[in-house]
Amino acid sequence: MVGFLVTPAQPLDRTSFETNGQDEIDLSQLARTLWRGKLLIILSAVVCLLIGIWYAYFQAIPVYTSKAIVALESRQEQVVDIESVVTGLSGDQATINTEVEVIRSRGLIEKLVLELDLLADPEFNASLRPKSNFSIGAAVGFIRGMLGSPVEEREIDPRGELDAVIDNVLKSISIANVRQSYVFSITAITQHPTKSAKIANTLANLYILEQLETKFNATQQATSWLTDRVAELQIQLEKSEAEVKDFNASAQLVSPEALTGLNRQIKDLRDRLRETTAVKEAADARLIQLKTIAEGDDVEAIANAVNDPTLNRVLQLMQASGDSNPDRAAFDARLNQVLTRAELEATRSSSQIDALRNSIAEQERQIEDQSSDLVQLQQLQREAEASRLIYEFFLNRLKETSVQAGIQQADSRVLSDAVVPLTPSAPRKSMILALSMMLGLMAGSGFVLLREFAQNTFREASELESRTGYTVIGQVPSIPARRRKNVLKYLTDKPTSAAAEAIRNLRTSVLLSNIDNPPQIIMSTSSIPGEGKTTQSLALTQNLTGLGKRVLLIEGDIRRRVFSQYFDIADQPGLVSVLSGNTQLSESAIRIDELGADVLLGEKAKTNAADIFSSERFAEFLNHARELYDYIIIDTPPVLAVPDARIIGKSVDAVIYTVKWDSTSHRQVREGIRAFEDVNVRIAGLVLGQISSRGMKRYGYGDSYGAYSAYYDN
């Protein structure tokens, strides 16, 4: 793999390590992720397409759709009109919605079921369908039989069976109102074209027939009610007219005109009473005047005042006699006659007044009695007239209703009958296939994105660098060796393989990590065991010896001691013996020909390994080794397992941190790097190891690794 020059290590931003790339969606990265998973997405689309083909062509049952069109005849009628009894649906939205519900009502659907005998149709009657041996009910019955529980035999309820069929028919029928119109579409979807058309047409006809039956029943009810009401009104009218006749027979009132004549007579009497009263008053005044004058002695003055012709002649005779003392007997006699006549006139006026007053009182009594009778008569006549009008109104309505019976018109009519469809409406195979492919693409894309978002390991060097802040100095592919002993043989036999070239690039990056002070002691470590750091140490050692350098490989993991799995070495004194002074380095280091370098094995020690590496003897040992070898490679334990690597790291020139491809989690790498930073140990660079070419292609990263690996011999 391509090596990189090492840049100075940047401090680990522990917050950004977890949240890097999570604050916003990178569309380009999202597109690259989908592109890398294109094979999986295509496979998912193909699988879904095959499922769609299987469903559309082999599994789905063809269904046929037929549609009948019904129009609502809207009328606005007067409430008192007989048409309101037999017609009169308004065209408002509430009425339209009501009619839609009427068409799909269970009562109307029940008539449809009985009309077409859909109880005998297995499509709607589930009890007529052949029972599957693998149904859930059969399985439950079998289990109950095995357990010894009695199997209940349920009797078929005719009403329940009919209700179930009605429910299934309702599911196959849809009613819709065409927007901004009084038109309804009745759609039926069944497995047979003729059946679909027959159901739609029959339902439309039943709906119209239902309207006619409803109106006929309403007319019958109205006729019955009107008949009873007319009979009652006739009896009431006859009773009212009889009351008027009886009252006329018993009352003294001749007619309203006679009452008017009485009113005119009493007016005349009152006028005469006023005149007579005036005459009486004048007569009384005359009488008083005459009596007063008659008391005087001056006959001439009396005659002038009385102004009576006879009295004046008597006075002239008296004066013609020439007698100085004439006889007044004739004069007085005539004066008395005048007085008597005046008294008679006054008395006659009083009698006339009394008579007039009695006549007026009698007339007033008659008028009062006849007025009361007239009011009562008029009331009885009005009641009789009202009864007659009501009777005639209801009688006319009864005649109209009787005439309307049997000639009602429906409020709806069929605009177009449903026709038998020639081709099935479903399944729509092209749409199913298109949707299946789209669903497959979406499912594949979702799986790729979900896998990518759920991925907690490292697959690309760029991701490892962005999350840690350290440079990736090597990308080492997985070495195809079944046994660890064959690793060096593979690298020796295939010097131009991708793995060998990756080790060379790693060597170059390590040696150039510090140009002024090239590293001499190089430590290899990782987060956890099994990440390939030991294999990498061996390969790097072998590669450095190829430069003609003297190289010492130290097994720093004295706890596990895995070098024995790579080399056939008997028990030899190792690192612990050298540090304890029991042997010299030159005596304990073993020359491995296939490696081309010296190997210092680890030994089991009674002292804690961390204490051994922390001792001054270990530091002196490394200084001595610097003098004997050009490069010293130390293979240490994983940093998260034991503290040995952090202690050794303080004494080396470069630390190589290995991360296993698509295995080590983000948290493990974070904790491992943090462990070195906490003790101020500088990491020279990271190595992404054990990269699987097949895995890279499987995840869609073949463009970043496959082309390079194909350039070399494997």
Image (spheres, grey):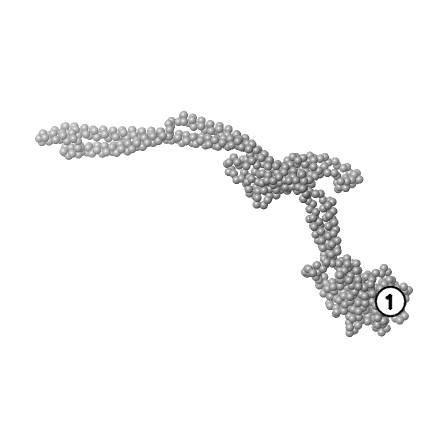
Q: Position of residue 519 (x, y in %)?
A: 80, 71
Position of residue 353 in the picture relative to residue 193 (left or right): left
Residue drawn at 16 percent across, 30 percent down: 309
Please rate how many residues cluster around mark 1, counting C-alpha atoms within 10 Å: few if below 14, some from 14 to 19, many from 20. Answer: many
Res. 594 image quadrant: bottom right
**Of the pair 469 and 309, the residue shown nearer to us:** 469
What amino acid does circle 1 point to? Answer: Leu
Q: How many marks?
A: 1
Residue 150 in view, yes or no = yes
- Residue sticking out furthest to the front: 422
Residue drawn at 65 percent across, 38 percent down: 198
Res. 366 image quadrant: top left
Q: Position of residue 551 (x, y in %)?
A: 85, 70
- Residue sticking out furthest to the top: 249
Res. 564 image quadrant: bottom right
Position of residue 669 in the picture relative to residue 597 (left or right): left
Q: Is residue 592 above or below residue 409?
A: below
Residue drawn at 58 percent across, 40 percent down: 71
**Of the pair 335 and 669, the residue shown nearer to us:** 669
What residue would you read off at disc 1?
595
Quadrant, the N terminus: bottom right
Position of residue 210 in the picture relative to residue 364 (left or right): right
Quadrant, the C terminus: bottom right
Residue 221 in view, yes or no = no
Q: Position of residue 707 (x, y in %)?
A: 77, 62
- Helix, strand or loop at mark 1: loop
Q: Position of residue 201 (x, y in %)?
A: 63, 38
- Residue sticking out furthest to the right: 570
Residue drawn at 55 percent across, 35 percent down: 86
